[in-house]
Image (spheres, rainbow, N blue to C red):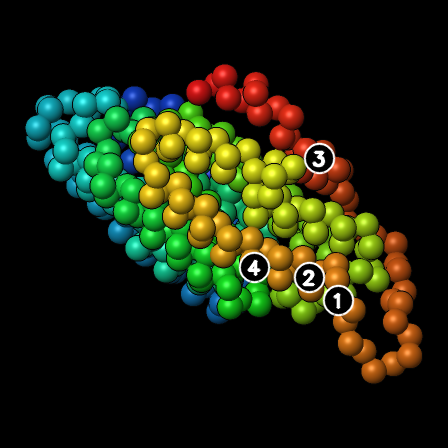
Amino acid sequence: MKPSIFIIIMLTVISGTMIVMTASHWLMVWIGFEMNLLAIIPILMKKYNPRTTEAATKYFLTQATASMLLMMGIIINLLHSEQWTVSKDLNPMASIVMTTALAMKLGLAPFHFWVPEVTQGISMSSGLVLLTWQKIAPLSILYQISPTINPNLLLTMATMSVMIGGWGGLNQTQLRKIMAYSSIAHMGWMAAIMMYSPTMMILNLTIYIIMTLTTFMLFMYNSTTTTSSLSQTWNKTPLITSFILVLMMSLGGLPPLSGFIPKWMIIQELTKNEMIMMPTLLAMTALLNLYFYMRLTYTTALTMFPSNNCMKMKWRFERTKKTILLPPLIVMSTMLLPLTPMLSILD
């Protein structure tokens, strides 16, 4: 793809999301989603082959169905309220339809099936856009309609997402699929807190985007797509290996690292609202996620890749990939915990 065309398409994707976030008219919200969807397809198919075509088709069909449901919810609300304004007093039926449509767009369970398939079929850079930027627009609408969302519906989807995100990733060897299941689980955490503290959801989303961005950039820097190829990083880039180790611990939500902040604050907020079973379930299923992150850590940093020859070290060629953003991203992904008191004031 020519750089000029790529820039135009990326600008369309960005402007689509911005329209969704800033619009106060339901039709403009829908148009923003459509702009975003139609512009992201060429980005998913950047490397043109049958697998990317299949992934882009799956993504398009799912998102088009979700857009149709969203428009149906908008029309139901229009018939009841006789206005197009994005407001907090939605009709209950319209709210259920819209929540279902946005869950479909996000990949919340039980509408999660497309996420691993699509992420696996596209390139690493496209997967990065799909699992970070594409989550912003639907979550911004959920944030706006959060007072009228049916709590039983959202909490059921949140619980299922966290469980499927944990169990689904256990058996995977492909890094993109592991990141896709990780995304489903994180979306579940965000959906769980949406009803009680939408601001906390934004904090969780921000930290999730930072951590996912760093993880993908480290994988892209090493040109790795499977766990077996990760096990060769110790002799190519030893420092990067230790960074991946710490980053996986952060994604799993272990205490001294940034990933612990949203989990800690969400469990605290849910407990304040006299919910005991939900945070207990979330904490237990987070262990499943931690297990497959630990597996990645083990293959990356704690094993030596078996080779037949006597020479274990590889030749280290000069790196051509730029890593300007990696140092600040690694710091943000691991060392934000001291900021927690300041972040807790936001709520």
Q: CA distance from mark 3 to mark 4?
A: 23 Å
Quarter of the image where one finds residue 112: bottom left
**Looking at the image, is mark 3 or mark 4 nearer the viewer?**
4
Mark whose residue sits in front, 3 or 1 = 1
Q: Nearer the viewer, residue 177 or 125?
A: 177
Q: Residue furthest left?
A: 80
Mark 3 crowdedness (10 Å alpha carbons): few <14, some 14-19, many ≥20: some
Query: Residue at left 29%, top 35%?
Result: 30
| Residue closest to the eye, 161 or 67 | 161
The secondary element bearing badge 4 is classed as helix
State the SS at label 1: loop
Q: Which numbered disc, 3 or 1, marks the residue that appears first in the sequence?
A: 1
Which circle's residue, 3 or 4, is located before the other in the chain?
4
Q: Is residue 230 left or right of residue 318?
A: left
Q: Secondary structure at mark 2?
A: helix
Q: Is residue 232 visible?
A: yes
The residue under label 3 is: 331
Sequence-earlier tag: 3 or 2: 2
Residue at image location 38% in from the left, 32% down from the top = 271
The circle on residue 292 is 4
